[in-house]
Image (cartoon, rainbow, N blue to C red):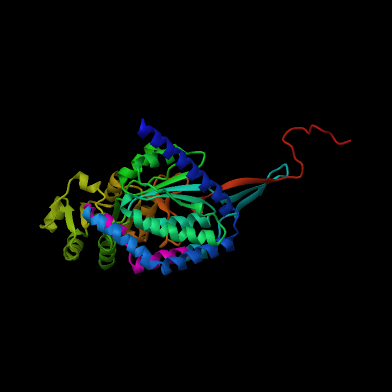
Amino acid sequence: MAQQIEQEQQDTELVAFAAACKKASRVVAGLDGAAKDRLLRDMADRLVASEVDILAANGIDMDNARENGLSSAMIDRLALSTERIAGMADALREVAALPDPVGEVTRMWRRPNGIEVGRVRIPLGVICMIYESRPNVTVDAAGLCLKAGNGVILRGGKEAFHTNHALAAVLRAVLNEHGVPGEAVSLVPTTDRAAMNTLLTLESLIDLVIPRGGEGLIRYVAKTSQIPVIKHYKGVCHLYVHADAEIDMALNLLIDGKASRPGVCNALETLLVHRDIAPRFLERAGALLREKGVTVRGCAETRDLLPWAEPADEADYDAEFLDLILAVRVVDDYDAAVAHIHRFGSDHTEVICTRDYRVSRAFVRDVNASVVMVNASSRFSDGGQLGLGAEIGISTTRLHAYGPMGLVSLTTQKFVVFGDGQTRHRAAIESK
């Protein structure tokens, strides 16, 4: 009984918490572009000035993460440094420099009856971010949501609890100084799953949920939520080295895509190599991968060329390793490569290396991932790298947004109609 009363009290508090964010979001929606840009630039400066406090909080989380045996990928995402704090601040400045999408008229047309119909961008309202490990999401989400005129509810994971509180405190202090309610950036004060479940029922107060983290978290949120959810289950990203690829270029794409930061969703997980180029390419690729500490799991033909490689099974080609592990398959031709991607791809990012223009155009046409790249590293599949400013998430579900989501993806469009007294049916009052 006591537990039920406690849960009911927590639910009541969460409803009030979300309602306060909804109310604050209306204040943010009323800010003009210049006011929002000043706010974001001040937030960036304050983050840098608060580095000591932020790193101290992050140090507590890092110690706890090691004690609790978090994976190397999770620890890498959790860790902050002077450089990463500066990067978060720069991301806020980049968002401030972007054109304000709110109020943009994207299209106007005239109907035969003389009415003018338009589409105008407006804020979505309140965005709920549910994320694991990455404290930069706290800052990126706040900056993007505020610039797009939204409020944001942040529910970070327990592994980043102290870091997220330190970051949110800085952002809320700047909001208050600018006369904007701090509740526009609301950090859920508990990491209790029951609290998350309650938030996912508040469809009258929250307009969109964006989960960021492991596949298990995202599937749980998608299954539980009564609110629309942006989904991105995993990033099984492929590099296909075509028969006429420039070998040095393909090697650079491979090493950057796999070894530069293996614990992120735009890292390469599978290498597909055309049979005609495999002997020449894999000899050099294998040496570089071993040098970088990458474990190769390959098909029989790959192991003939790289005897030290481990055998690959079907599960390896479906895996998001998030580690220095690479699945490799030698394929007969272009069609076999595309068929493999269709079977095992996750709609995230796919790369081809080729000098044949017709093949590159076919790849862009045939592969429907959210990001398709020709002769460029998979690591560019990122909102900042694609010119969106900071990235709030990646959608691989094609509805509302597809691919890296930046500022514009946090708006929707309403219809605006201008008339001169037109009625759909005969006027009720006839002129005399």
Task: From the top left corner, tell me how far across and down residue 272 is, in percent.
Answer: 25, 54
Horizontal side of 305 relative to 6 (left or right) equals left
Q: Quadrant of the C terminus?
A: top right
Task: From the top left corner, tell me how far across and down residue 308 is, in percent.
Answer: 10, 58
On the image, which quarter does residue 285 sit in? bottom left
Q: Is residue 69 magenta?
A: yes
Q: Is residue 417 magenta?
A: no
Q: What are the residue bounds of the magenta stretch?
A: 68-92
Horizontal side of 350 relative to 418 (left or right) equals left
Extreme-right residue of the structure: 432
Residue at 65 percent of width and 49 percent of height:
109
Task: From the top left corner, tell me how far across and down residue 286 is, in percent.
Answer: 17, 62
The relative height of residue 110 versus residue 177 in the rendered view (above or below) is: above
The relative height of residue 334 versus residue 38 in the rendered view (above or below) is: above
Q: Could you say which is closer to the camera, residue 176 or residue 199?
A: 176
Residue 273 shows in this picture: no
On the image, which quarter does residue 302 sit in? bottom left
On the image, which quarter does residue 293 sit in? bottom left
Residue 282 shows in this picture: yes
Residue at 27 percent of width and 59 percent of height:
62
Q: Could you say which is closer to the camera, residue 27 or residue 409?
A: 27
Residue at 33 percent of width and 44 percent of height:
217
The relative height of residue 303 versus residue 87 in the rendered view (above or below) is: above
